[in-house]
Amino acid sequence: MPKNILGTKLKKLREERNLSQNELSRKLGFSERYIAKIESGVKPSLRAFKKIANFFDVPVEYLISENEEISLLPIKNKELLSAFIEVDRMK
């Protein structure tokens, strides 16, 4: 995974929803080119970071971790989530 983990994952999520950088910026209430800046490596504010995670309904950990196994499911119980990941590895 590249060093710009957040930018790479944000771009992936944005493209999965068929949104341009400007469209996503407007939907989140950011300046027109803010998403482009984040995707290129500019660190967002904490407020912006939370808005992005909430918009895509992903845990913050997914956006900042190189680990692709962090679930995108809304499972809050970490023990249960770990059990599901372990079972999935058994396939």
Image (cartoon, rainbow, N blue to C red):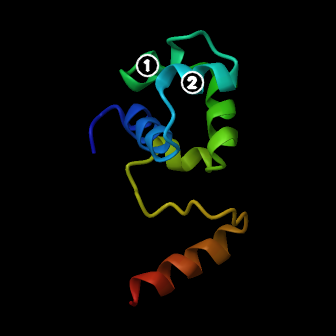
**Residue highlighted by disc 1:** 36
Report how far apart the C-alphas of labels 1 and 2 lie in the structure.
11 Å
Marker disc for residue 70 = none
Residue 58 is left or right of residue 47, and the answer is left
Residue 67 is left or right of residue 57, and the answer is left
Along the line of sight, which residue is nearer the eye, 33 or 77?
Answer: 33
The quadrant of the rendering that contains the C terminus is: bottom left
Q: Position of residue 81 (x, y in %)?
A: 61, 72
Outermost residue, front side: 18
Three-letter residue code for mark 2: Glu
Q: Circle 2 — which element?
A: helix
Residue 72 is left or right of residue 54, and the answer is left
Q: Position of residue 5 (x, y in %)?
A: 38, 38
Asked which quadrant contains residue 51, the reply is: top right
Q: Circle 1 — which element?
A: helix
Q: Report the residue at 40% width, 56% height from top.
A: 67
Q: Report the residue at 50% width, 60% height from top.
A: 70
Residue 36 lies, with reference to residue 88, above or below; the image says: above
Q: How many marks?
A: 2
Along the line of sight, which residue is nearer the eye, 52 or 86?
Answer: 52
Q: Report the residue at 41% width, 26% height from top.
A: 39
**Residue highlighted by disc 2:** 23
Q: Position of residue 60 (x, y in %)?
A: 60, 44
Numbered disc in front, either 1 or 2: 2
Three-letter residue code for mark 1: Ala
Q: Report the residue at 40% width, 89% height from top.
A: 90
Along the line of sight, which residue is nearer the eye, 30 or 62?
Answer: 30
